[in-house]
Image: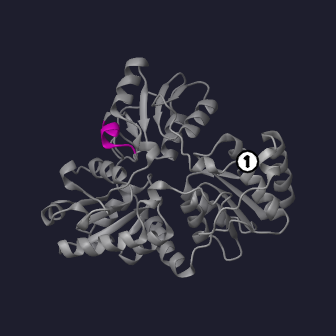
């Protein structure tokens, strides 16, 4: 990956108002040739300029549909820009305003480590293991997933993809005996429990240990092999946060992201992806009280949008994605200045062979039919009454 250049002083010393004026001018000048994508966890300063706001996969698909957009500027993190490039047309350039904006969780599952894991696990069992890889992963890992017969998933459809992986091939499934869930162990565990499996049906594969730290018996017993990875934003939520907010706010409805630890999800009233959380709040009754366990930019935006409800972050300290925060007004202004001058900077481009396989893993996910059962609940798919 190319290195991020140091920004000229004009961008670092300009005020937010000056930068906003600069960005608005360049955006108007570029017109329909430009499409700016803003992830839900991005700051309001940047979101105001987004043509589309959403989760990473939705944004990538929307951008690919904008055939007139020569430039796709992704205000997110690196794996998101990769997904956009995988789905974009050959004549579209995807730019990440700050190349330092990465994802710690995606980096926890490197391509070589995933290759090693599949080989090690195959040596430990004759059972068919199929990888299911979260979209929060590199293009290289998505490609490996496709080659191993697996599919990608999002936090919205992970239950559907797990059900497909475990279904027999005659029923259109992958015929897996076991799933290797990459790279978030919490999403994998919460989904397994929501599907009716027990915690004992899960075993954690640690890529830093020989054979993942697992013995043959553990592999044989487990239906779900969970990659030892996590989102540092969602892992910071603890059971005491749920107990404390219930003691502080009467009749509060607690909803958390399924990347949170299982102990938190089990105590919450519901869990769901960012899109599911947004829809749940929108459908909630006026005057409802909500404590939300996800990134604070999204929660604060929901609070502003729904003034008829009491909405707060579940924890006391704000859970911030510092990687997402690397995309700011100075970097966005610098990127658009260069594009307006005909210079493509910070282009994220996936090798065509890798992109083809990664695209297959994404398409496999898109083609999977929904599994029966609700998508939102105390664990993904296990619902309680919405008091919000």
Q: Is residue 220 visible?
A: yes
Residue 5, given in percent of the width and then of the height, sits at 70, 62
83 relative to 132 in the view: left or right: right
- Residue at coordinates 35% horizontally, 46% vertically from top-left? 381
Place residue 113 in its image quadrant: bottom left
Place residue 246 in its image quadrant: top left
Q: Nearer the viewer, residue 196 or 133?
A: 133
375 relative to 123 in the view: left or right: right
59 relative to 226 in the view: left or right: right
- Residue at coordinates 81% horizontally, 55% vertically from top-left? 27
Q: Residues within 10 Å of mark 1 (few under 14, many from 20)?
A: many
Magenta highlight range: 260-266
Q: Is residue 170 visible?
A: no
Residue 236, given in percent of the width and then of the height, sits at 41, 39
Name the outermost residue toward the bottom.
353
Quarter of the image that includes the N terminus: bottom right
Residue 19, given in percent of the width and then of the height, sits at 80, 46
Place residue 43 in its image quadrant: top right
Q: Secondary structure at mark 1?
A: helix
Name the outermost residue toward the left.
217
275 relative to 258 in the view: left or right: right
Q: Nearer the viewer, residue 212 or 4?
A: 4
Q: Main secondary structure of the magenta part?
A: helix
Residue at the spot of label 1: 329
């Amino acid at each position: 990956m190319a290195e991020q250049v140091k920004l000229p002083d004009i961008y670092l010393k300009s005020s937010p108002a000056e930068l906003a004026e600069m960005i608005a001018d360049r955006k108007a000048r570029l017109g329909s040739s430009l499409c700016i994508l803003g992830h839900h966890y991005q700051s309001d300063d940047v979101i105001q300029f987004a043509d589309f706001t959403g989760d990473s996969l939705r944004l990538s698909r929307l951008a690919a549909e904008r055939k007139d957009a020569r430039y796709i500027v992704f205000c997110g993190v690196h794996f998101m820009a990769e997904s956009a490039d995988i789905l974009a047309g050959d004549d579209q350039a995807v730019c990440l305003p700050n190349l330092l904006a990465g994802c710690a969780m995606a980096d926890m599952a490197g391509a070589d480590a995933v290759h090693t894991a599949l080989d090690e696990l195959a040596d430990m069992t004759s059972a068919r293991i199929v990888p299911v890889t979260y979209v929060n992963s590199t293009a290289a890992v998505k490609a490996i997933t496709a080659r191993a017969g697996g599919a990608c998933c999002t936090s919205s459809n992970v239950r559907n993809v797990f059900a497909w992986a475990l279904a027999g091939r005659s029923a259109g499934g992958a015929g897996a005996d076991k799933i290797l869930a990459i790279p978030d162990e919490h999403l994998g565990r919460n989904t397994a429990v929501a599907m009716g499996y027990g915690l004992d049906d899960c075993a954690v594969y640690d890529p830093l240990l020989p054979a993942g730290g697992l013995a043959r018996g553990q592999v044989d017993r487990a239906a779900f092999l969970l990659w030892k990875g996590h989102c540092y934003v969602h892992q910071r939520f603890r059971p005491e946060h749920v107990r404390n907010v219930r003691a502080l706010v009467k009749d509060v409805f607690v909803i958390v992201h399924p990347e949170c630890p299982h102990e938190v999800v089990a105590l919450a009233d519901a869990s769901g992806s960012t899109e599911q959380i947004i829809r749940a709040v929108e459908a909630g009754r006026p005057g409802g009280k909500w404590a939300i366990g996800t990134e604070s930019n999204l929660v604060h935006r929901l609070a502003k949008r729904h003034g008829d409800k009491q909405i707060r972050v579940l924890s006391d300290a704000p859970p911030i994605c510092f990687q997402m925060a690397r995309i700011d007004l100075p970097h966005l202004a610098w990127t658009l200045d260069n594009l307006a001058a005909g210079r493509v900077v910070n282009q994220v481009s996936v090798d065509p062979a890798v992109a083809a396989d990664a695209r297959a893993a994404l398409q496999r996910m898109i083609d999977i039919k929904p599994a029966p059962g609700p998508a939102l609940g105390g664990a993904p798919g296990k619902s309680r009454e919405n008091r919000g």
